[in-house]
Amino acid sequence: MKIHCYIKNKLPLLFLYGLVFVLLACSFALYRLPLSAVAYPMGLGLIPVIVYLIIDYRAEKKRFDQVRELEEKIRDLQQELSDDQEKTQRRMDYYNVWAHQIKTPIAAMRLSLEGQDSGFTRRLRSDLSRIETYTDMVMTYLRLDADSTDYVFREQDLDEIVRGAVRKFSGEFIARKIALHYDPLNETVLTDEKWLSFVVEQILSNALKYTLSGSISIYMECSDTLDIKSPGISNHNHSQILCIRDTGIGIAPEDLPRIFDQGFTGYNGRTDKKASGIGLYLCRRICDDLGYQISAESEPGKGTVIRLNLEKEKITS
């Protein structure tokens, strides 16, 4: 801070001091008193004013320098943040391009396997489906943290969504001789078909991954509750719960509360080195956005059931 800028800021104070001096001088002149009688004390009073201004100028200069230093640091941090965001965006753009480009060889390999039916080709188709699932996971992970989402809510037939997911893994069901028990759901839900399909596919993928033998069951659990919140108004809650149950290795009790956390793999993840701990985390994030509740119940060695609560609330008077 330059001294002339400081003095300019203190001009009102100096003007006030000069005005006091002029008023006293005029008063002394009216009473025909010598001006030296007022000039001397005013001159002495000027000394502490000057001392105050010197001390205050140093303090102001120190604060000004600190503020300027902070502003420079903020500009540097903003520039670093901008550079990091640019780098992150470039990486995101690359991942998006990669995820879309990888779909081409996947589709080509799938076409090459069409019309061939042997144990080897069935295993290849199963592995190809896994690759496609992991690719979809990457694309879903990128979209979830995007500035805008592409949710489109419509009335959807739940059976069509679930059957589409089952068809995707049909080759793996057959190749591994995993039985499928499917009860028609007969439900219509207001949802985004693409995102709900991803959730169902991911749950089925996990069920198949950790079911060495046995079966996977898909069915609905329904319950009706009555809750009176205010006089004259009753709330009938019709809970639609989509269940996907497997007879797999199950989940350890200490791991169960954290299976929807990002990156958590637990005991099963330590057994399966390829587990990423991302799939169920993405399911939970999507369910939060869709307004659903997802939960798990499991017993080691007996299997796991994932419940997807598609709740509807109706208010009648």
Image (tube, rainbow, N blue to C red):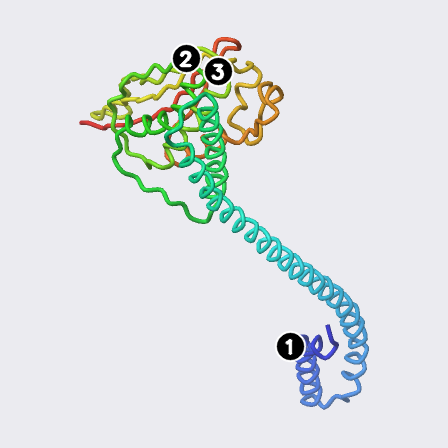
Using the image, tell me which numbered label, if any, was put on residue 12.
1
> How crowded is the residue under tag 2: few (<14 C-alpha within 10 Å), some, or many (20+)?
some
Q: Are marks 3 and 1 in contact (CB under 8 Å)?
A: no
User: With 70 as the anchor, is 136 left or right in this view?
Assistant: left
**In this view of the protein, which residue sits in the foreground, 200 or 313?**
200
Q: Disc 1 marks which amino acid?
A: Pro
The amino acid type found where label 3 is placed reads Thr
Q: State whether residue 54 is above or below residue 103.
A: below
Q: Residue sitting at 45 percent across and 43 percent down?
A: 104
As drawn, is 212 to the left or to the right of 55?
left
Q: Could you say where residue 307 lies in the image, as x and y percent from the top left?
A: 40, 20
Q: Quick one: SS at disc 2? A: strand
Residue 38 percent location from the top left of the image? 76, 83
Residue holding disc 3: 211
Q: Earlier in the sequence, mark 3 or mark 1?
A: 1
**Residue 245 appears in which quarter of the rendering?**
top left
Is 306 placed above or below 301 here?
below
Q: Position of residue 89 (x, y in %)?
A: 54, 52
Mark 3–mark 2 CB contact (< 8 Å): yes
* Quadrant showing the C terminus: top left
The quarter of the image holding the N terminus is: bottom right
Q: CA distance from mark 2 to mark 1?
A: 88 Å
Q: Which residue is mark 2?
A: 215
User: What residue do we see at 70% from left, 86% from top?
Assistant: 25
| Whether label 2 touches label 1, CB < 8 Å | no
Callout 3 secondary element: loop
Q: Secondary structure at mark 1?
A: helix
Give me the C-alpha separation between circle 3 and circle 2: 8 Å
- Few, some or many residues within 10 Å of mark 1 (<14, 14–19, 20+): few
Q: Residue at x 52, y 13 (%)?
A: 249
Q: CA distance from mark 3 to mark 1?
A: 84 Å
Q: Earlier in the sequence, mark 2 or mark 1?
A: 1
